[in-house]
Image (tube, rainbow, N blue to C red):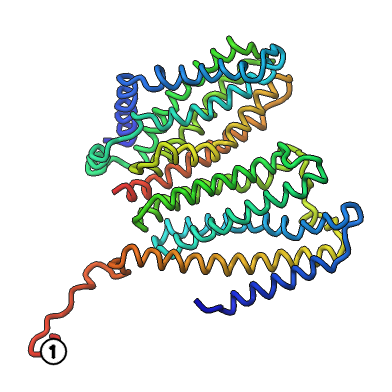
Amino acid sequence: MSLRRQIATLIRFELRDELRGGEVALVVLPFAVIALLTIPMAVGIDTPLLERIGPGIYWSIVMLFGVLVTQRHSSLAPAAARDMLRLSGVDPAARFAATTLATFILLLGFEVGAGLATVLLYNPSLSSWWWLAALLPLTAAGLAMIGTIGGNLVSGLQTRTSLAPLIVVPIAVPLLLGAAQATEGLRLGAGILRWVLLLAVVDTVLALAGVLTARPLEESAA
Amino acid sequence: MSARPLDLAAIGTLVTAFVAGLVVPPDAVQGDLQRIMYVHVPSAWLAYLSFTVTLVASVAYLRVRSLRWDRLAGASAEVGVVFTGLALVTGMIWGKPVWGVWWTWDARLVLTAVMFFVYLGYLALRRSFEDPEVRAHRSAVLGVVAALQIPIVHFSVTWWRGLHQPPTVLRPDNPQIDAPLLFALLMAVTAFTVVFVALVSRRAELTAAEDAARHPDDTDATAGSAITAPIVGGRTT
């Protein structure tokens, strides 16, 4: 089986698992919307202030709750399934790519859902909404890669639910800064190309790191 | 555990740097307050150095799979986290009278704090594994990925233009610091670096001893080394 088919098959498995469980759509996304709803109750109902800070809050929510998406149950292959894949000769890089791409698709859906809630609740104004077509996928891709690497690092540990966010969130901070600064630039009508490039560079480096370290991580799971 | 030449050198240079930091004249603007620089700057330097050593040792482990590199990576990260914490605390103490606040949302401060937590996570990951091989594999991967932060932290002053003072010594044109103060600062940097080497060396030895105590059967023997030639009539054949 070619690498491409391996990846496509594994993505289908993961997305089908997620479709059955509905963890992202029915648990994580509603939880994120609750967070978006409660923040104005804490900071006060100052409409101009909320319009101004809405995009920043959105990206914070995406980063923090996005970690839950990356560590969802369907991204965790049971030990027996991992062994079977290894014995079947599935390339570790293919497994990394498949989990990352499945997570990317789910994160993108999560970003769109949380984004709609932000627009409804905070009414932010951006000079150009088209740039979001680049910002959302770039951020989702970076977070998906960090989350997949983090998930592999803590797989099999009893403390994985607390350890994974501690590892993933600080490493994802450049993504948050890039995305938030770009959105702030859009709000003020300033150029954002360098922030988009920053996100692209971080994504490229993470992709290289993920593919190159997939095999050592696979060996440590044996 | 007896003192080695490296330990003695660390103590000697540290005492010398301490004296140098006290005897040089105070800063013209900040007065004696500026002397905290002799702890803050070397601590920040060691943060960068230690995490770079962790990166190099992690890459080396992934290439040669020797636990020595893993122990070096872990020891360097541990010492680095201590010095990063020291840089943050001394920065806050320095920042209060200069900026008027303990903490400000300057990019370099925030990202140094982030770096602190990245390597705190690295250390937490290391502590989660009993098996040295599994620990080494996984922490080496994180050691490489975490290093992505270092250049971003380093260049953040330029990227985000915060409150933090721009580089004073490492300027392309010329250092913006008087010679006696520069001398004391370089003494402190040297002393802290020697202390770093001594601490990392001791910590790596301790990790090796911990691994040996937890897994007394683990040796560096290769497959088949337990097989010996048959003994016939008191002699090996």
Q: A70 above or below A157?
A: above
Residue A137 in the image, given as x and y percentages of width and height:
52, 25
Q: Quadrant of residue B9?
A: bottom right
Q: B155 above or below B25?
A: above
Q: Quadrant of residue A122?
A: top right
User: Around disc 1, counting alpha carbons within 10 Å, would you say few (fewer than 14), some (14 to 19), or many (20 or more)?
Assistant: few
Q: Residue at x 59, y 75 (%)?
A: B6
Identity of the residue furthest to the bottom in this view = B234
Nearest the viewer among B192 and A145 is: B192
Residue B101 in the image, given as x and y percentages of width and height:
77, 40
Drawn side of residue B24 relative to residue A44, left or right: right
Q: Quadrant of residue A171?
A: top right
Does the image show residue B217?
yes
Identity of the residue furthest to the right in this view = B28
Q: Residue at x 56, y 15 (%)?
A: A37
Drawn side of residue B71 relative to residue B31, left or right: left
Q: A90 above or below A180?
A: below
Does the image show residue A126?
no
Nearest the viewer among B59 and B80 is: B80
Nearest the viewer among A76 and A210 is: A76
Q: Residue at x 63, y 24 (%)?
A: A56
Where disc 1 sits, the SS reads strand
Q: Residue at x 62, y 67 (%)?
A: B195
Q: Chain of mark 1?
A: B
Residue A96 in the image, given as x and y percentages of width and height:
38, 38
Q: Which residue in the protein does label 1 denote?
A: B235
Residue B219 in the image, given as x and y percentages of width and height:
31, 69
Kindly identify the amino acid type of the residue bearing the numbered disc 1.
Arg
